[in-house]
Image (cartoon, grey):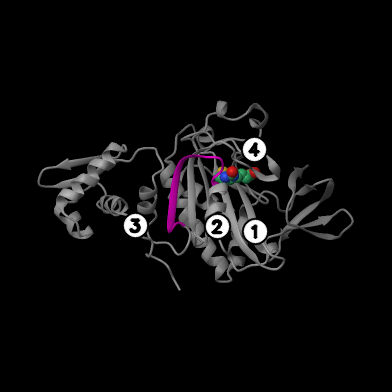
């Protein structure tokens, strides 16, 4: 059954939606009051509260309210209002000023039995983590650091499908919201200008044959400056701001990513992974290249040929065997 439109939007989210729908025009207090079923005085009180959070909402006598500018902060109501109706991902959004890792928060939600689709953002993380135990730098107000709770009906091996879906969603959203041309490096890196701007970390709780839940963690380096990155990653990491010389609207990008993720997840659920895989393959810098895949002490050298139906990378080794790679660290070779 579709959950589209079912997310319980708070008053503030509904007011912001109505203001956004009015675009450069205004919406009267009376109209807002009628839409939301509350008094004009209550609308005024909510507007004052939003102003105190940095929303620049103009009030013109006889005409009404206009949203002149939203602040560069992540606000759950604002994100819900930008997102609108979704099937699963983003029907519950929570924003923290600081967490250890948003994936820790989602893990707790998962154990508490929260429905899939919940998304947790943090303005900063004190112990953000990347793949292979690497730390993930997450300075306040500069990026998008968030985790999504999913409860897909898939085998543990098919979790790679979710990484493929997330990578496609990220490239689509970055392309639509910025002037960047992102590429994908298998399995989880989004590159701009050959350097990493975003990463995906999936952590799962599974039985032998069945996934119980997946925590999909996504980090996007939006407005970081070179000095925000530790010296050891400066050669390989970048941000959308460094690549373009412009700062980008984090909330707009966040909403676009969630919308794309929701659509991609729906495709997986309805048996249309092949559509995502095709789009992924078109943008992938890893395919048809010589690669080295390191997994623990093991290294496979070969040519990356394609993705299989579960999202694994198929690598033809120098001995002619086709190896299915589901994890590890891939480097591109000459
Ligand atoms: C990688 O490329 O190594 C994956 C990076 C994933 C980072 C994100 S930021 C939000 C979520 N919380 C974490 O601690 N990690 C992920």
Marks 4 and 3, Cα distance to the nearest angstrom?
35 Å
Marks 1 and 2, Cα distance to the nearest angstrom?
10 Å
Specify whether 25 is left or right of 209.
Answer: left
Q: Secondary structure at mark 4?
A: loop
Disc on the earlier residue, 2 or 3: 3
Residue occupied by mark 2: 110
- Callout 4 environment at 10 Å: few (<14), some (14 to 19), or many (20+)? few
Marks 4 and 1, Cα distance to the nearest angstrom?
21 Å
Contact, CB < 8 Å: mark 1 with mark 2? yes
The segment highlighted magenta reads 90-102
> Can you give x and y, in whole percent of width and height, for residue 32 in the image?
20, 54
> Can you give x and y, in whole percent of width and height, for residue 246 in the image?
45, 33
Q: Is residue 94 visible?
A: yes
- Callout 2 environment at 10 Å: few (<14), some (14 to 19), or many (20+)? many
Disc on the earlier residue, 1 or 2: 2
Disc on the earlier residue, 2 or 4: 2
Q: Is residue 190 visible?
A: no
> Can you give x and y, in whole percent of width and height, for residue 125 in the image?
54, 38
User: As rendered, which of 251 and 247 lies closer to the eye?
Assistant: 251
Residue occupied by mark 1: 205
- Callout 3 environment at 10 Å: few (<14), some (14 to 19), or many (20+)? many
């Amino acid at each position: 059954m579709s959950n589209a439109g079912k997310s319980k939007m708070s008053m503030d989210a509904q007011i912001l939606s109505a203001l956004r729908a009015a675009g450069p025009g205004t919406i009267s207090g009376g109209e807002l009051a009628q839409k939301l079923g509350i008094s004009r005085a209550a609308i005024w009180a909510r507007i004052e509260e939003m102003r105190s959070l940095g929303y620049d909402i103009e009030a013109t006598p006889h005409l009404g309210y206009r949203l002149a500018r939203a602040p560069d902060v992540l606000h759950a109501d604002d994100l819900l209002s930008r997102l609108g109706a979704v099937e699963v991902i983003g029907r519950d959004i929570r924003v923290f000023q600081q967490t250890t890792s948003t994936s820790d928060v989602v893990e707790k939600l998962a154990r508490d039995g929260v429905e899939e689709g919940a998304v947790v953002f943090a303005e900063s993380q004190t112990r953000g983590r990347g793949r292979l135990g690497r730390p993930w730098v997450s300075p306040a107000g500069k990026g998008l650091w968030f985790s999504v709770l999913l409860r897909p009906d898939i085998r543990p091996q098919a979790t790679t499908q979710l990484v493929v879906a997330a990578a496609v969603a990220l490239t689509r959203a970055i392309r639509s919201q910025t002037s960047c041309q992102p590429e994908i490096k298998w399995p989880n890196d989004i590159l701009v200008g050959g350097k990493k701007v975003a990463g995906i970390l999936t952590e799962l709780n599974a039985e032998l044959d069945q996934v119980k839940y997946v925590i999909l963690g996504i980090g996007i380096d939006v407005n970081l400056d070179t000095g925000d990155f530790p010296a050891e990653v400066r050669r390989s990491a970048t941000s959308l701001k460094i690549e373009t010389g412009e700062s980008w609207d984090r909330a707009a990008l966040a909403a676009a990513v969630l919308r794309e993720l929701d659509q991609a997840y729906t495709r997986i659920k309805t048996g249309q992974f092949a559509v995502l895989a095709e789009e992924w393959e078109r943008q992938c810098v890893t395919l048809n290249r010589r690669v080295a895949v390191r997994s623990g002490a093991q290294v496979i050298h070969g040519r990356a040929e394609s993705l299989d139906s579960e999202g694994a990378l198929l690598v033809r080794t120098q001995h002619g065997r086709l190896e299915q790679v589901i994890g590890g660290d891939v480097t591109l070779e000459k």
